[in-house]
Image (cartoon, grey):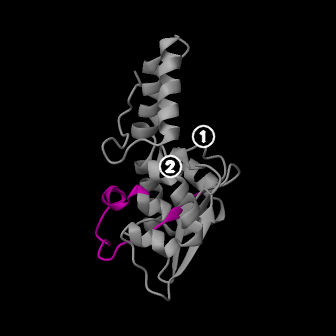
Amino acid sequence: MAHDHPGDDHGQHPPSDMELRVKALESLLVEKGLVDAAALDAIVDHYEHRVGPRNGARVVARAWTDPQYRARLAADATAAIAELGYTGRQGEHMVALFNAPGIHNMVVCTLCSCYPWPVLGLPPVWYKSAPYRSRAVIDPRGVLAEFGVSLPDDVEVRVWDSTAEVRYLVIPERPAATHDLDAEALAALVTRDGMIGTARL
């Protein structure tokens, strides 16, 4: 029997052929004693709860509140993110993309599902899906509209293709009327989708 992980999108859509194959392979490996189900759960828990979107949210909040940090993040995102202790697999070469009043950045991996695990955790199912991977490049405004993001015509949408060599983190615009909030409260406003570029804060 396939081993379910917390955080899977159960009940939202039928599993894809790839998801079914992964679950079958996992089940077989566990049954044969080649993989420990508890070890898999520990790995998933690590990326969902110890690393993940809250790490990226702390990077964003720091960029909003510390101009010197923001400059370091723009110059060398890998090093600036590492200052906060977020490094490792899938985050070896990071680039920060800064949204602005006339610019909205959006990230996709057209080949597979390259994603910055240390700051965003595990990628959502939709990020790995073929429709998102192809349509984000062909019709980014249409995709954004499906996520509930409607941008004025004078806002330029920039789509960035994540690869095995470089991963991106979108720094959303700071919401208005948040000047009294501390870094922790600001980080609580930041969403995973905002750091991919499929949401606005």
Kind of element beneath mark 1: loop
Q: Position of residue 61 (x, y in %)?
A: 42, 61
Q: Measuring 47% from the left and 43% from the top, which residue is drawn there?
A: 16
Q: Quadrant of the N terminus?
A: top left
Q: Nearer the viewer, residue 110 or 56?
A: 110
* Mark 2: amino acid: Val
Alpha-carbon neighbours of circle 1 within 10 Å: few (<14), some, or many (≥20)? few
Q: Magenta stretch?
A: 168-192
Furthest residue in direction right, as rendered: 165
Asked if residue 172 lies left or right of residue 179, the reply is: right
What's the distance in space between the residues labelled 1 and 2, CA to CA? 10 Å
Residue tagged by mark 2?
Answer: 119
Q: Nearer the viewer, residue 13 or 71?
A: 13
Q: Measuring 49% from the left and 78% from the top, which residue is drawn there?
A: 100
Magenta stretch: includes residue 133: no
**C-beta proximity under 8 Å, tags 1 and 2:** no
Residue tagged by mark 1?
Answer: 88
Furthest residue in direction bottom, as rendered: 154
Q: Measuring 56% from the left and 14% from the top, which residue is drawn there?
A: 34
Q: Position of residue 80 (x, y in %)?
A: 58, 55
- The vertical placement of 110 against 176, above or below, is above
* Mark 1: amino acid: Gly
Q: Where is residue 35 in the image (x, y as percent from the top left)?
A: 53, 17
Q: Quadrant of residue 75?
A: bottom right
- The vertical placement of 137 against 128, above or below, is below
Kind of element beneath mark 2: helix
Q: Position of residue 41 (x, y in %)?
A: 42, 26
Residue 61 seen: no
Q: In which quarter of the image is residue 177?
A: bottom left
- Counting residues from the start of the chain, the first of labels 1 and 2 encountered is 1
Q: Quadrant of the C terminus?
A: bottom left
- The vertical placement of 161 against 33, above or below, is below
